[in-house]
Image (cartoon, helix red, strand yellow):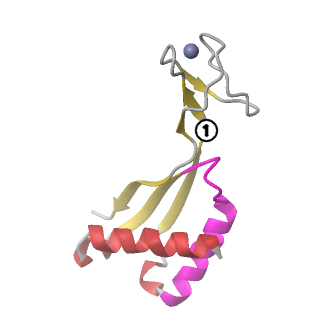
Amino acid sequence: MHETSIVNSIMKTLELEFEQEKLNRMKAIHLKVGILSNIEPRLLHNAYSAYHLTHPQYHHVKLHIESTQLKIQCEVCNHVTQVKNYRFICDNCDRPSKNVIQGEEMLIHKVEFED
Ligand SMILES: [Zn+2]
């Protein structure tokens, strides 16, 4: 399953990034998931629950997923437009644009630790 490997890679990234002592105090992971990223938040939550079966040390760590909207930046006037209904047209000058600057990514936005 696609989402299982995403969860594995998120956790691997955190384990490389932080010391064990810090990982023990981790209490929440915040992700930003673009609506065009092909990642289904519900399935990601399921995969994260399944991950705890083999990694019980993270059982108490909450996963927060924020969906990010689709935004384009116009190549002509640099205006940033939030795309609605897949209408890829600049709000400012009405030109079509495919320069997506947000909405395709999945990123670890923030990690919270106990004091
Ligand atoms: Zn424009």
Question: Residue, x 49% and y 79% (percent of image)?
Answer: 59
Quarter of the displayed picture in which ligand 1 can be seen: top right
Tell me the amino acid under the disc marked 1: Gln
Q: In the displayed structure, does residue 87 sit left or right of residue 17? A: right
Q: Is mark 1 within 8 Å of ligand 1?
A: no
Question: Residue, x 50% and y 66% (percent of image)?
Answer: 62
The C terminus, quarter of image = bottom left
Q: Position of residue 97 (x, y in %)?
A: 61, 26
State the residue lying farthest toward the top: 93
Q: In the displayed structure, does residue 23 sit left or right of residue 64? A: left
Q: Which residues are magenta?
A: 33-54
Residues 24 and 79: in front is 79
- Name above or below for residue 32 compared with residue 27: above
Is residue 104 within the magenta segment? no
Question: Residue, x 55% and y 88% (percent of image)?
Answer: 53
Magenta stretch secondary structure, dominant:
helix
State the residue lying farthest toward the right: 85
Q: Position of residue 77 (x, y in %)?
A: 50, 13
Q: Secondary structure at mark 1?
A: loop
Residue 103: name its quadrant.
top right
Q: How many marks?
A: 1
Residues 82 and 45: in front is 82
State the residue lying farthest toward the bottom: 54
Q: Position of residue 45 (x, y in %)?
A: 62, 67
Residues 5 and 49: in front is 5
Question: Residue, x 42% and y 72% (percent of image)?
Answer: 11
The N terminus, quarter of image = bottom right
Q: Which residue is mark 1?
A: 69
- Name above or below for residue 53 compared with residue 18: below
Q: Position of residue 12 (x, y in %)?
A: 39, 74
Residue 39: name its quadrant.
bottom right
